[in-house]
Image (cartoon, rainbow, N blue to C red):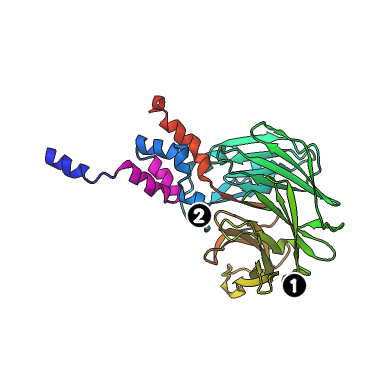
Amino acid sequence: MAQAMSSSSSWVLPMDLLLEISARSDPVTLVRSAATCKDLRRGIADPAFHRRLRLCHADRFVPKLLGGFFIQNLDMQVNEQPRFFDPLQRESPEPFRSFLSEFDTLFHFYRPDLAASHGHVVLRADSDNCGMCVFNPMTGYLHMFGPPPGINAPSFALLTGDGHGLYRLLAAELAPGRLRTQVFSQAVDKWLAVEETTVAPCPHDAALLRRPLVLQGDVHWLYRSSEYHFILSFSAAQAAVSVTKVDGSCGEKLIGRRPQELLLVSDGRHGRQPRLLVATGLQISLWMLSDSDSGEASWSMQVLVEPQRIRRPAESWSERLELRWFGDKSGFVFVRMAGAEDRSPSWYFALDLATKKVRGVCTGAHRDVLCCPYEVDLSFWRPSFLVNCNPRSS
């Protein structure tokens, strides 16, 4: 018996090695590792361990961070409960099912058209007072508050990654020659003072096209004027604004394009320069700004998806795409293909930028079905780890 125990114990790995393996694993494996024993759970809950995570230093997209899609039928006569769909065909974790069961009418009153990042989703009330809501289904966090009192903001950006799981919601509007911003701070639970930053050049007829892209704490918006398209970049840390004109062959390509056919994305690395996705019919191309041999920056294009690579259902579809959403951690782009007729169903699919593969998500009516993508974030599992590591609860 003693010999058997000695043989078995020789296969036990040191705790440092187990933590190193856990740090290099994917989110699902990390959670399972934390559930194996109290010592490993305590090590994973240590804030010093989180700085070692591979995902914190990843130089590429991590597709497994796409948790899935919240799907809600808005037709009250259908009486269909909200559900959570995973395009990677993994089993949905219990927190999603419990959250949707408790807040089954959330998407009937709020619209997820604002921002989402690091496990949080920002919603805006479908009413005149435009109240706001931030939720995290993994932790059950839900907070409702009023709109920004200082500005009539047409755009919102969710700023996270401060190391403490706290978020800031940036509301912004472009006025003639200046960018007006106001921040809601979770730490103090209120909107802070309005700040203004000079913007030059700033076309007087600039129109915001899409929701912003956040890269390394900087916020990027895509605008269009009567003369050209441009990217407005704002550094919240430095309170500085820069303008990048979209010119050359890329600028010509954007002429006549609908706002839904344009979307800012990243390259999956730690760069601060956004890239531009353009849908032309059923073709999706990626435009990048890079330095040329002459020393001047120029736009270059790479075709990501050809029409024949999109395997559609058997129904009849239109020849146009809408680029709905981009996950900066997972690298997925959420795309809608409209039906051939106005009242025909739409087809929703996810484009994996890392592999250029298309994954079908669902079909449904354009106006009656709400589909909200969701990316998970490791930092928001920390509270559950800490509770389980509490000696009193063990």
Q: Residue at horizontal 82%, vertical 58%? A: 201
Identify which residue is drawn at 52% across, 52% down.
65
Left or right of 57 in this view: 133: right
Tally of numbered tags? 2
Q: Earlier in the sequence, mark 2 or mark 1?
A: 2
Say few, some or many: other residues with alpha carbon within 10 Å of mark 2 (under 14 / 14 to 19 / 20 or more). few
Q: Residue 380: x, y in percent?
A: 53, 40
In the rendered structure, the answer to whether residue 321 lies left or right of residue 270 reads right
Q: Nearer the viewer, residue 72 or 113?
A: 113
> Do labels 2 and 1 touch, CB within 8 Å?
no
Q: Residue 147, relative to residue 176: is it above or below?
A: above
- Residue 106: give x, y in percent of width and height: 65, 40
| Residue visible at 50% across and 44% down in the picture | 378
Residue occupied by mark 1: 248
The reply to whether the magenta stretch includes residue 192 is no
Residue where numbered disc 2 is placed: 58
Quick check: 13 left or right of 360? left
Is residue 190 depicted above or below 71 in this figure?
Answer: above
For the record, the magenta segment spans 14-34
Name the chief secondary structure element in magenta.
helix
> Does the stretch in magenta take in 22?
yes
Q: CA distance from mark 2 to mark 1?
A: 33 Å
**In the image as oriented, which residue stretches furthest toward the front?**
295
What quarter of the picture does the N terminus occupy? top left
Secondary structure at numbered mark 2: loop
Q: Give, as a three-letter code, the residue at label 2.
A: Ala
